[in-house]
Amino acid sequence: MNSAFFSDLLSTISERGRTLLRLKTWPQDAAGRAGSLIDLCRALLSGRGEASGLAMAAEVFARYRTLDDAGRAAFFAALADEFGPDHDRLIAAMEKWRADPCDAVAASVHYASEPRRLELFRRLNRAPGGTAALVEMRADLVDELRINRGLTLVDRDFTHLFASWFNRGFLVLRRIDWSTPANILERIIRYEAVHEIRDWNDLRRRIDPPDRRCYAFFHPALVDEPLIFVEVALVEAIPGAIAPLLAGERVQVSPERARTAVFYSISNCQRGLAGVTFGNFLIKQVVEELRRELPRVETFVTLSPVPGFRAWLARAEDAPVEADALAQLAALDDSAWTSDPEAAERLRRIVEPLAAHYFLKARTPDGRVVDPVARFHLGNGARLERIDWMGDLSGKGLKESAGVMVNYLYDLDDIEKNHEAFANQGEVVASGAVKRLLKGERAIFGIAAPSFSQG
Amino acid sequence: MNSAFFSDLLSTISERGRTLLRLKTWPQDAAGRAGSLIDLCRALLSGRGEASGLAMAAEVFARYRTLDDAGRAAFFAALADEFGPDHDRLIAAMEKWRADPCDAVAASVHYASEPRRLELFRRLNRAPGGTAALVEMRADLVDELRINRGLTLVDRDFTHLFASWFNRGFLVLRRIDWSTPANILERIIRYEAVHEIRDWNDLRRRIDPPDRRCYAFFHPALVDEPLIFVEVALVEAIPGAIAPLLAGERVQVSPERARTAVFYSISNCQRGLAGVTFGNFLIKQVVEELRRELPRVETFVTLSPVPGFRAWLARAEDAPVEADALAQLAALDDSAWTSDPEAAERLRRIVEPLAAHYFLKARTPDGRVVDPVARFHLGNGARLERIDWMGDLSGKGLKESAGVMVNYLYDLDDIEKNHEAFANQGEVVASGAVKRLLKGERAIFGIAAPSFSQG
Amino acid sequence: MNSAFFSDLLSTISERGRTLLRLKTWPQDAAGRAGSLIDLCRALLSGRGEASGLAMAAEVFARYRTLDDAGRAAFFAALADEFGPDHDRLIAAMEKWRADPCDAVAASVHYASEPRRLELFRRLNRAPGGTAALVEMRADLVDELRINRGLTLVDRDFTHLFASWFNRGFLVLRRIDWSTPANILERIIRYEAVHEIRDWNDLRRRIDPPDRRCYAFFHPALVDEPLIFVEVALVEAIPGAIAPLLAGERVQVSPERARTAVFYSISNCQRGLAGVTFGNFLIKQVVEELRRELPRVETFVTLSPVPGFRAWLARAEDAPVEADALAQLAALDDSAWTSDPEAAERLRRIVEPLAAHYFLKARTPDGRVVDPVARFHLGNGARLERIDWMGDLSGKGLKESAGVMVNYLYDLDDIEKNHEAFANQGEVVASGAVKRLLKGERAIFGIAAPSFSQG
Amino acid sequence: MNSAFFSDLLSTISERGRTLLRLKTWPQDAAGRAGSLIDLCRALLSGRGEASGLAMAAEVFARYRTLDDAGRAAFFAALADEFGPDHDRLIAAMEKWRADPCDAVAASVHYASEPRRLELFRRLNRAPGGTAALVEMRADLVDELRINRGLTLVDRDFTHLFASWFNRGFLVLRRIDWSTPANILERIIRYEAVHEIRDWNDLRRRIDPPDRRCYAFFHPALVDEPLIFVEVALVEAIPGAIAPLLAGERVQVSPERARTAVFYSISNCQRGLAGVTFGNFLIKQVVEELRRELPRVETFVTLSPVPGFRAWLARAEDAPVEADALAQLAALDDSAWTSDPEAAERLRRIVEPLAAHYFLKARTPDGRVVDPVARFHLGNGARLERIDWMGDLSGKGLKESAGVMVNYLYDLDDIEKNHEAFANQGEVVASGAVKRLLKGERAIFGIAAPSFSQG
């Protein structure tokens, strides 16, 4: 990493201005502070902001950081109420449109309808560390949004701006390994969201051995802050369970012998960038990277959780489960079955077809595939390759997915076709093996699959 | 410079996709190629673009580069005509506004009125080297604009997007010196627009000695491409002429003894980024940098050309020149006066007050200060500090400005105040010395200054 | 850190050669392997070594790593016995000297008497990673030396060569902080020899806060391997105890307010470089660094252990302790006194003068200052500034030094003078406060100090 | 390049000390300055040098730089006369040897006979920039050596030390291209010794196109200073002439189509490192590099000058030229033949066999191959592959070698064998084609080759 490249010269900016601004009195109460901050934001949008904008922007962030919950709530409310578009200008533009509905006037409407907070955010971004500060501010907004739905407009503007600024063309892919700076590794530990990294030794096991890889996207303006990262295991064949991959004691695979790369964990890092998608690009670029470095690796596959499976099972109306089978599924509530091969086998014969149904047939009321992880990978153009019975026997795995995991296969030659089938026809592209499980379902339950699909 | 940081991993992307796409036939004629390219752009905006967008974006650029003039003209015309906003969606949003003119609906109007080419540009940017390719495309558009004014909308969208992407918060200030990579230095030679750099030796004289500095802004996505750079000389006192600064043989000043930093050349590098302003930020950050490194340097000043002066003089109606003086000004047409001290002194007494008038009183028909360089620095909050008689006796200097140069002073404490005076009241903030020259003008011409000002 | 700079291109060297060499059979027994290795070393010194020396050198290291204890013992013995100087050549050179005892002939004697293993080591160093491999080999030799004193000559040659190769002019000072790569930080944890670093959190407390610093020397050929490092605390006044510096919960000092830099731990990292001194240079350069960065820090001082104090106290013949005091010193055997203020005060009055005596008067049989840490800092030109009663109440501190620590003061203006006084007259330069403690000793024990000085 | 890694922290060292030392008076005359400098060197070797050695070493260099020719002559003479070994210590060690001629005593003799200037050089090296300053000092010594042969001992010590410090294991191979910092490229222009680089455009033609490469060795302590570099052209087949390779207008070869890498220029850069060999290692590592990057390149060959050929031809006693042929060779004195195909063909039939003889048979009085470039490549284990008639028709090429060039082939599989044949039996390993030319010689001149071999 070369953090210094981006940070050294920037740090000295605008200290002068900040000192000057700070001489003014700073209110003690939340409302006063929010109001004062809003005044400063208005000044930043004025001509003064053009002359000494960096200093003012830095001061906005400095003051923002002193706000408490009430202050932030007031500040965000003001952002929503007072930094919308200039209505007069917008009305004038729309008048013109009525007279002359051409693209040129549409453009006037477009720029006239831009909320003023977008320009405010752009000016704030000029401050040293401005991008990071805006991403933090958005993270606060995401929290506040739960309380005040009126902030949705502000949130949409943030998302729109960040989607443009964090365009994939500006991201940098970096490999994360044991020679990565500790401050970045610390964040990898903190941000891992799928299979917790317990400590530095656990981290090292995931990034240091030659059959393990980790890659992250960075943005030049967010120094040392990964945006998203993926953990990869190089193995011989597609794995069916997570535990052996994460085991402290395991036999390493020489990278030359590996034929399969397993993406077993992918985590977004920045709450302030929620809604801006990186995962699609990350997986595909890592596939390209690995193909280049290890030409013998030909299979690129995930080992993924199935977070919605048991919740779906529990909703009787959705799952095509007969009473008898339902009774047997009760065994899932106690993990005892995992150490009883016969019980496990009984469950397997019920759960596997149900899982196939869950992916291939079940839909949400608005017609979408139920599983969010499935939606992500299928939307990326991956294929549902295999259902892994007893793939995750951790507490979380049992509770969320009856221990089931799945593999999504990324075949670059088919990605576009798969994506279109999924996006346009809602078709879940799946391997024959998975489809056969569905036939098993019919055999077992004696029911016609279509009856479970939604309109 | 750390170009490698941004370039190494990116280069391999999407080669696969490009090969696939190229198998399709590529028309031979301009119209056919432009049409085929536009088809590909439409596909990139569709669902397919989501699945394999990087490959398609890279292919768009690859095909674009094969276009000839006619092909580019057709392509840009299609960008203007076919990638505007979705009129139906826009009309619907405006209908809603009539019923409910609130910010939420205004936001719908805003997003509905966005030209589709903006999203196209954002998707194109995802390709490896996409940002550079878009900047090149815009440079072509700037050329085409002279022929086809209908492309103004496309140009405005480019400018809007680039202003957001090249936000000052994403720029990196780098010092340019003799240890800078040659490929960057080569561009400095090429892009210098004020005082030509003749060869590598001339370049070295400007960046290598301890009393010379050069700084440039870079953007992480434009590897090795300076956006704008400024050349600085460290001297003891404010200089009144450019030749001694650029002389091959000159006495160097120890940086410890320097008290004044002279910004004697500032050049924009990217034609494709015309309209996005960097100069203001560059000058101010370099002032901060130098203050930090050399605390004894207290005066920050430009040595600037006056490109509009003689043209203004020649427009009789503008310049307050009496017949007698006018006759004497004719001497300016022949550079002989520069080697005749008496003639020079005669001219000085006429030209200096006129120059003061040019800056302080003369205005364009729409009320702006005449000199474009003056508008830039005064708009930044600088003060017109001194008029330098015989400051530039080069052919260009004599021809454009009668050999006159000026110094603009950047005093960070006054920048905001100066800017506001200029922006709001149109007041040109000038030193007493410059103002006194104006009084001299009155004495000489026996005329009241106000009579020359414009309404 | 820029490890890659040194490692990328080197790694591919000589793979070709190694493969060829490996085809030969490699004995299974220790003696056979050592013999075969020695044969390869001889070949490396021959003409063949000139043609394909890198491959052969790499092969020597590859084979060396397969040796077991017995194999290494045999290999080192052969290095000692068979790679000494060429006796015939040496005798001839000495004959010449008898006839003509001039410098030119002395040079012949010098080069003729060079052990052949020095050239062997130089050729081995050419292999990729050769320097690191030689340092490891030397570490093995240091172990073997305890068993076979006959290896002293080999060890001396290693030391001589390493002292030249690791000349201070080739070392690079790097700051170690929380953005340092994890593989280097891991070594800092492992190599800390004075105050153990318990885990990554403990490490972070020592390198990340703004009032903590850590610096290390690196050598370009030992990628990612610190040679020596020092931990520094920035504080207001000279500290008298280690525990507050290392406490998990403590009030940080703003670097601007710090007036004192405390070197509280300095650790050598490479056993294979034992005997090559770095500490002297490291401390002085860090002093220069801190002076430059923090001009207000004016006092540079250590907080050092006194490892030999209690052992010296226990040798009755050395310590000037009267019977009564001796009885009281017995209380040191039980740490109970540390929580009994009165007992502690009684001990203080006895121990402090004894400590002053220990430093100022006591000498080893061969006339040296007893304490090894004192010898190091006094030899560097530091001054014994203060004796810190109850400075280290850890188990180790109580056991080794009765809880006493000391501060050595580095005043760059006096270093040369202090060093000369110590080196030439054996004078321990100490502050008045320490000297006064010695007077206290006289008062208490009623004895003339000189009588305790060494014979 | 990452020069900063090695330079930033080092620069501040020892400024303090230097100021102190400079207060002393500095003589005005050469003898006085040399004497004063020698005094300082003695002090550096004393105990004071241990305490504040860096400052003193820096001061030695600062003073050395003020010396004029006479001062340097006196300084070097003193280095030779007064910094030899300690004779008393040496005599004592030799006495011991007489009593006990074992390796341990030989080691004493070795270390006792070490000239004190070696330790002086090691201490000087500790100064910031010390290594570079020592290399410069050696360059001065090389000049002085022509006048004062008594300095040979000093020169030998420098060479011995530098050979150890610039061990190949400490060198870093870097590619030189158009993104290399200008200060390094400037040195490439200056140091090119085989085919002059005329200006920056010429340089760019040699390093920027994809079918051109340039590699250099660097040493971490000589920041930005290449030690040796080689220029490489990627081509399809072995070239027979230099001009097409260097032509401004030429057809580039795609690296994928290249099958042959031609080393057409190799230049040592540091006069102060004369006698320390790098070329052997550089060529072999570049071969490894290129094999790795471009697996289809299978032939590695030089295109080399034959600097001694015409001088040898002119020495009648050496060349096996009959009177008739000799008369024809006179045509070489005028370059007219190069544009007369018939004359050229006549010359070819005489010169080619003579060239074969020159390489294969001719020897210097002490039995070595005559051509120095041949000795270098054959000593490296290369094979004389081809004689290139009219390979270099430049003025220099015609004058030195009758326009002849040659190719030496580096086949890594044969390098060791070739080297041994050359080193042990003096055999010039050559291709059949070259050997056949020799047969041609016999046919033409009717003489038995052995008769021309050296006495």
Image: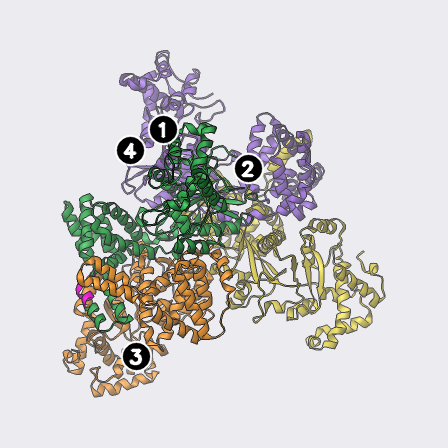
Chain colours: A orange, B green, C yellow, D purple
> Which amino acid type is shown beneath numbered disc 4?
Arg
Residue in the foreground of this view, choosing between B66 and D401 = B66
Across and down, in percent, residue B1 comes to 42, 48
Type of residue at label 2?
A: Val
Query: For the stretch drawn in magenta, what is the main secondary structure?
Result: helix
The answer to whether marks 3 and 2 mark residues whose Cβ atoms lie closer than 8 Å is no
Residue C393: x and y in percent read 66, 71
| Residue highlighted by disc 3 | A402
Three-letter amino acid code of the residue under disc 3 = Ala
Frontmost of labels 4 and 2 is 4
SS at circle 3: loop
Cα distance, mark 1 to mark 2?
33 Å
Q: CA distance from mark 4 to mark 1?
A: 22 Å
Choose top left, top right, bottom left or bottom right for residue D262: top left
Let me know if residue C401 is in the magenta part: no
Quick check: C189 above or below B221?
below
Q: Are marks 1 and 3 on the same chain?
A: no
Tell which subunit mark 1 falls on: D
Secondary structure at numbered mark 1: strand
Q: Is residue C136 left or right of residue C422?
A: left
Same chain assignment for discs 4 and 1 = yes
Q: Is residue B86 magenta?
A: yes
Residue D250, disc: 4
Question: Residue D351's image quarter?
Answer: top left
* The residue stretch that appears in magenta: B85-91
Residue underneath mark 1: D406
Q: Which mark lies nearer to you, 1 or 3?
A: 3
Same chain for marks 1 and 2?
A: yes
Of the residues shown, which amino acid type is indicated by label 1? Val
Chain letter of the residue carrying label 2: D
Q: Which residue is mark 2?
A: D135
